Image: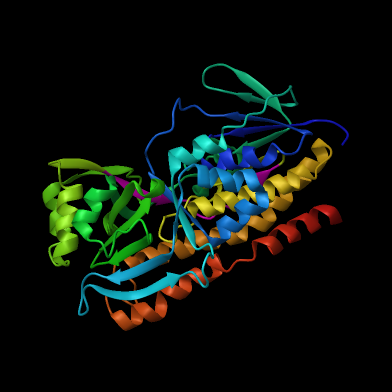
């Protein structure tokens, strides 16, 4: 190596933390991470790591995969999709299971705990030719700037231009309320068949305009409980949240099976009103890169959570970008690494963003071809995950590295 390449990563969320963790194994990279928040918040509660993301974690390195386990991630042995309303209520639509014992399907992990594990290693370094100016008046110089600064990314606006419609996120047309519930309380509400730490599984319930999901996390001590109703009037708006009353929530579940209706009442309706958060996404960007600047994670491709791939895309980004930057010997080669990163990552990630919204319509009973018809849901729903779960991450990495070597 001819010298140190100075890299600044803005944002200490999953994208920034996983990238820094991946870059630390390259001694010629001088890495700094910048995060404005003083502590990790519970917002987002838990994230899923699907099969493709788990492969990417292992390719980044043993310490990254170990961080997931140390954070108390719970491997789900199955993901069940259930029909809650219509002509066949309380009926299984389909299930994704381990193809063989021990196969990694998906892991559910508490977001804040995982970030703490990823950021347990630090790096420091010198100055460089790019100068970052922060709101508190401080500055920092670097060769490469990676924007991992989330859905409202300032770096994305720098790359695309503030007047580009794709520089700003948009309301996707759903709001959600989530709760982290003690395991025994959730089990008492939903029953042993649906909450079982010895045989953990995720359940998603399709209703008429509303979706409900629950899964076990934090080594079996907690259950994540989420509802997501469709709000077509908000689709494309700039609404970030809304107030929802307990009466409004109960009304959504009047026709649901009693067990689920009672669980919603006990776990989510303990207050007269509460703030619901809207789901947002990014319009497709024409590029993720401009010279020595790029974006990753939600700053590049914020998505709705319907296919559980937001966290997985961030991990894949970190794998590819770190591998390319690790092979750069000069700041000029680092520019080439960013360009290749954008070329290989943009098609996959933007396809997932588009697919996720379509899946959300199906999951809330609003699919044009499916509605609440059991057989049509069985035909149309599950194949939407094939291109995500069966993705060849190793080939994706090899292709990117080959492009870097070819020049």
Percent x, y of residue 17 = 57, 38
Q: Is residue 40 above or below residue 174?
A: above
Where does the N terminus fall, quadrant-wise? top right
Residue drawn at x 60%, y 45% is: 64
Q: Nearer the viewer, residue 105 or 31?
A: 105
Percent x, y of residue 256 = 17, 66
Which residue is the extreme one toward the top?
137
Q: Is residue 238 above or below residue 81?
A: above
Residue drawn at x 16%, y 67% is: 257
Which residue is the extreme one toward the bottom?
375
- Does residue 228 appear in this view? yes
- Is 200 within the magenta? no
Q: Is residue 207 above or below residue 403?
A: below
Colour pattern of the rendering: rainbow
Q: Which of the 4 image quadrants contains residue 356?
A: bottom left
Which residue is the extreme one toward the right?
2
Q: Nearer the viewer, residue 196 or 374?
A: 196
| Number of numbered discs | 0
Q: Which of the 4 image quadrants contains residue 362?
A: bottom left
Q: Is residue 294 left or right of residue 219?
A: right
Percent x, y of residue 83 = 27, 72
Which portion, as a residue range, is magenta?
276-290
Q: Which of the 4 image quadrants contains residue 173?
A: bottom left
Q: Nearer the viewer, residue 129 or 176?
A: 176
- Is 287 within the magenta? yes
Percent x, y of residue 383 = 47, 75
Q: Is residue 362 left or right of residue 16?
A: left
- Does residue 371 appear in this view? no
Q: Is residue 282 left or right of residue 222?
A: right
Residue drawn at x 51%, y 61% is: 352
Which residue is the extreme one toward the front?
198
């Amino acid at each position: 190596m001819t010298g140190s390449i100075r890299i600044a990563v803005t944002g200490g969320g999953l994208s920034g933390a996983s990238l820094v963790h991946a870059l630390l194994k390259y001694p010629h990279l001088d890495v700094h991470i910048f995060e404005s928040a003083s502590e990790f918040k519970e917002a987002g509660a838990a994230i899923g790591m699907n099969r493709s993301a788990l492969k990417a974690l292992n390719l980044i390195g043993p310490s990254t995969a170990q961080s997931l386990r140390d954070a108390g991630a719970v491997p789900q042995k199955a993901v069940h999709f259930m029909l809650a309303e219509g002509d066949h209520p309380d009926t299984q639509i389909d299930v994704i299971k381990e193809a063989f014992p021990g196969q990694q399907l998906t892991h559910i992990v508490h977001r804040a705990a995982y970030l703490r594990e990823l950021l347990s290693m630090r790096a420091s370094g010198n100055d460089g030719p790019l100068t970052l100016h922060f709101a508190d008046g401080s500055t920092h110089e670097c060769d490469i700037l990676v924007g991992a600064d989330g859905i409202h990314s300032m770096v994305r606006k720098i790359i695309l231009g503030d007047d580009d419609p794709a520089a700003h996120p948009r309301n996707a047309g759903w709001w959600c309320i989530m709760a982290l519930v003690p395991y025994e309380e959730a089990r008492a509400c939903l029953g042993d068949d649906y909450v079982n730490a010895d045989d953990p599984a995720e359940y998603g319930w399709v209703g008429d305009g509303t979706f409900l999901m629950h899964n076990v996390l934090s080594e079996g001590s907690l259950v994540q409980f989420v509802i997501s109703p469709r709000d077509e009037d908000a689709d494309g708006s700039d609404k970030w949240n809304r107030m929802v009353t307990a009466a409004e929530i109960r009304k959504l579940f009047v026709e649901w099976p009693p067990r689920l209706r009672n669980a919603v009442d006990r776990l989510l309706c303990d207050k007269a009103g509460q703030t619901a958060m809207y789901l947002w996404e990014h319009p497709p960007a024409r590029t993720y890169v401009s010279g020595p600047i790029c974006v990753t994670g939600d700053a590049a491709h914020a998505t709705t959570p319907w296919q559980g791939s937001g966290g997985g895309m961030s991990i894949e980004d970190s794998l590819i970008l770190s591998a390319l930057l690790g092979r750069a010997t000069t700041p000029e080669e680092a520019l080439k690494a960013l360009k290749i990163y954008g070329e290989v990552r943009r098609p996959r990630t933007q396809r997932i963003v588009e697919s996720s919204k379509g899946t959300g319509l199906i999951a809330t009973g609003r699919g044009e071809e499916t509605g609440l018809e059991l057989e049509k849901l069985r035909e149309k729903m599950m194949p939407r995950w094939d291109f995500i779960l069966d993705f060849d991450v190793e080939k994706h990495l090899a292709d990117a590295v080959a492009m870097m070597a070819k020049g």
